[in-house]
Image: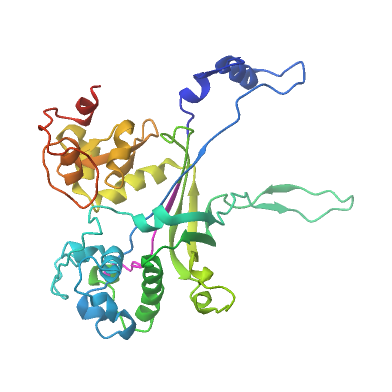
């Protein structure tokens, strides 16, 4: 991951940092004193969880008593939200290539964005994620000789292909959609293992694990604009959740404190660090869900997507999609120009999508063509 030019050219009260950095990189300091450099100040960045592909069609789950609540007819219910998040195909009605085994049913949920490849609930409520393994070069040391002489050499790859555990903590809130989501996500693979549930036929044909997710981890620069470090697991899934502690009882506490946070263990296979393929795959996975992003990556000018200037991100909170500029490592945020949020901001409609994004939407329509026009830049 290359340093951005601003990291080495910005100044400070002690003089130009570019000279101090250059001297530190180029030659040995005859004074023996530490160089006076600004400390690294990366921000905590972002975590993204891709959506799995569980088969939660009515035909598949209606005989499982514990999953029956997912058949709720209420579009805005937590049950419908969890069902359509974990099974993205339900929002499009496409169950697989040329497949109509499940009736190609299509249901709606205004709480889920069909064009989002990630699970906002997990990214927005996570408070910690620990357990990332270090990169270690395997070595072998020969048997000692008569004079105890030994030799050590590299004996393996530094790449991380084996399994490990990541421990995640999420902040729980009223309604507890996270609890239900984890319950369904934990149950589903076991029910498939028992033969009580069946994955989508195209995933069976390709021997894919439909309950896997990929976790992307981006550490950002001090402006929260450029990716400084990137990592991703190969694939993983939640394999434990603190279900038992929810039922602990303490008469001295009027409220159950056990439900404030949820600790989840993710079983992960492989990890990639400092590899630009992580950034490319981050973009690619979104094209599977969002045709507009695919078009933008090919030709931004002919796409329905537009890059949002950072000044307007607060106005379009929760309505943008992240992609990585592979040339600059900038984490760009895109907005669909056909979305109500965009039209309300540009004052081209007085429609309401249920949130207060822009005020005075009944004013005269804004006649600019882009968000940069809106800002006058």
- Closer to the camera in the image, 142 or 189: 189
Principal SS element in the magenta part?
A: loop
- Image quarter of residue 208: bottom left
Which residues are drawn in magenta? 205-217
| Residue furthest out toward the right | 147
**Which scheme is used to colour this image of the protein?**
rainbow
From the viewer's perspective, is residue 168 above or below residue 259? above
Residue 337 seen in the current view: no
Magenta residue check for 241: no
- Closer to the camera in the image, 304 or 279: 304
- Image quarter of residue 132: bottom right
Residue 124's spot in the image, x, y percent? 40, 53
Residue 183's spot in the image, x, y percent? 40, 73
Residue 189's spot in the image, x, y percent? 38, 75
From the viewer's perspective, is residue 65 above or below residue 121? below
The structure residue drawn at horizontal position 49% and vertical position 33%, both measured from the top left corner, is 222
From the viewer's perspective, tell me whether residue 213 is left or right of residue 78: right
Query: Split into 4 quadrants, where in the image is the C terminus?
Result: top left
From the viewer's perspective, tell me whether residue 223 is left or right of residue 150: left
The structure residue drawn at horizontal position 30% and vertical position 54%, both measured from the top left corner, is 117
From the viewer's perspective, is residue 55 above or below residue 363? below
- Closer to the camera in the image, 252 or 229: 252
- Closer to the camera in the image, 173 or 279: 173
Residue 226 seen in the current view: yes
The structure residue drawn at horizontal position 17% and vertical position 75%, both measured from the top left corner, is 102
From the viewer's perspective, tell me whether residue 204 is left or right of residue 39: left
From the viewer's perspective, tell me whether residue 7 is left or right of residue 57: right
Residue 376's spot in the image, x, y percent? 23, 22
């Amino acid at each position: 991951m290359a340093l951005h030019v601003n990291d080495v050219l910005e100044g400070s009260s002690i003089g130009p940092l570019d000279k101090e950095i250059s001297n530190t990189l180029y030659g040995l300091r005859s004074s023996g004193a530490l160089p006076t450099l600004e400390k690294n100040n990366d921000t905590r960045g972002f975590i993204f969880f891709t959506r799995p592909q569980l088969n939660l069609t009515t035909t598949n789950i209606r005989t499982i008593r514990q999953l029956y609540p997912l058949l709720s007819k209420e579009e805005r219910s937590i049950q419908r939200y969890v069902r359509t998040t974990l099974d993205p195909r339900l929002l499009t009605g496409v169950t697989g290539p040329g497949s109509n085994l499940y009736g190609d049913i299509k249901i709606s949920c205004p709480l889920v964005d069909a064009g989002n490849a990630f699970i906002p609930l997990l990214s927005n409520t996570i408070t910690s994620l620990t357990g990332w393994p270090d990169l270690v070069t395997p070595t072998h040391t020969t048997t000692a000789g008569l004079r105890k002489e030994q030799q050590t050499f590299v004996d393996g790859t530094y790449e991380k292909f084996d399994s490990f555990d990541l421990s995640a903590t999420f902040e729980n809130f009223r309604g507890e959609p996270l609890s239900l989501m984890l319950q369904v996500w934990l149950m589903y693979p076991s029910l498939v293992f028992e033969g009580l549930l069946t994955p989508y036929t195209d995933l069976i044909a390709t021997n894919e694990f439909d309950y896997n997710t990929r976790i992307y981890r981006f550490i950002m620069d001090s402006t929260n604009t450029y990716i400084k470090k990137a990592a991703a697991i190969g694939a993983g899934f939640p394999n434990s959740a603190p279900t038992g502690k929810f039922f602990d009882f303490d008469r001295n506490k009027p409220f159950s404190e056990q439900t404030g946070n949820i600790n989840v263990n993710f079983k992960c296979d492989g990890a990639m660090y400092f590899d630009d393929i992580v950034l490319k795959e981050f973009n690619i996975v979104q094209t599977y869900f969002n045709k507009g992003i695919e078009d933008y990556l090919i030709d931004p000018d002919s796409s329905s997507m537009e890059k949002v200037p950072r000044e307007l991100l607060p106005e379009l909170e929760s309505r943008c999609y992240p992609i990585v500029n592979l040339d600059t490592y900038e984490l760009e945020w895109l907005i669909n120009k056909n979305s109500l949020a965009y039209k309300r901001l540009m004052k081209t409609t007085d429609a309401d999508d249920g949130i207060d994004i822009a005020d005075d939407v009944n004013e005269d329509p804004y006649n600019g063509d882009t968000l940069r026009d809106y800002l006058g830049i």
